[in-house]
Amino acid sequence: MDHLSQETIKELILQSQEAKQQAYCPYSKFRVGAALLTIDNVVFKGCNVENACSNLGVCAERNAISKAVSEGYRNFKAIAIASDLKDQFISPCGGCRQFIREFGSNWDVYLSKPDGSYLKMTVDELLPVSFGPEDLTMKKVFEIS
Ligand SMILES: O=c1ccn([C@H]2C[C@H](O)[C@@H](CO)O2)c(=O)[nH]1
Ligand SMILES: [Zn+2]
């Protein structure tokens, strides 16, 4: 995956913090924002959107990815995630890890803190030995049958 400049990383994290401002989280009061950078250098932002029927809530990461895919973008360089947790890097939930992995296992996830510090991890590090679209090819299906 392309190496992002320090400036690009900083900007992407700032955009994830901007996205966090829009969080709709009256139940958890836990704001999360995500900023997704496509290979065309377009950024899609997403926040968590909760619901009175609590299991219907959507995470920030999934929201950003769904926005991008809906607009025709499927190739991503990086996603930055922001929350209000001061003492730890925000960690994407298991569902989001799988959702992120759908679009490749070799791209970057920046887990950030409000002060802009971050932990860079690849999708593969966040979700090792993952199951993805490649595992559903007809070739593999025929191999086992
Ligand atoms: O990486 C994360 C972790 C949590 N949440 C949301 C889900 C829920 O709305 C709230 C509390 O779990 O935070 C995200 O959007 N992304
Ligand atoms: Zn999630």
Image (cartoon, rainbow, N blue to C red):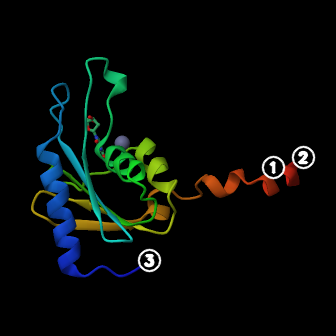
For this view, does 19 lie left or right of residue 43?
A: left
The residue type indicated by label 3 comes to Met
Residue ID at (17%, 78%): 7
The residue type indicated by label 2 comes to Ser
Q: Element under label 1?
A: helix
Query: Compared to 94, does 43 lie above or below?
Result: below
For this view, does 119 lie left or right of residue 87?
A: right
**Label of residue 145 in the image:** 2
- The quadrant in which the N terminus is found is bottom left
The answer to whether mark 2 and mark 1 are in CB contact below 8 A is yes
Residue 87 in picture, x, y percent from top left: 15, 54
Within 10 Å of disc 3 (Cα), the crowding (few <14, some 14-19, many 20+) is few
* Sooner in the amino-acid sequence: mark 1 or mark 3: 3
For this view, does 118 lie left or right of residue 139?
A: left
The CA distance from mark 2 to mark 1 is: 7 Å
Query: Compared to 110, does 127 lie above or below?
Result: above
Q: Kindly identify which residue carries mark 3.
A: 1
**Label of residue 141 in the image:** 1
The CA distance from mark 1 to mark 3 is: 29 Å
Residue ID at (14%, 62%): 14
The CA distance from mark 2 to mark 3 is: 35 Å
**Label of residue 20 in the image:** none
Query: Compared to 117, does 94 lie above or below?
Result: above
Q: Quadrant of residue 26?
A: top left
Residue 111 in picture, x, y percent from top left: 28, 59
Q: Residue furthest front?
A: 71
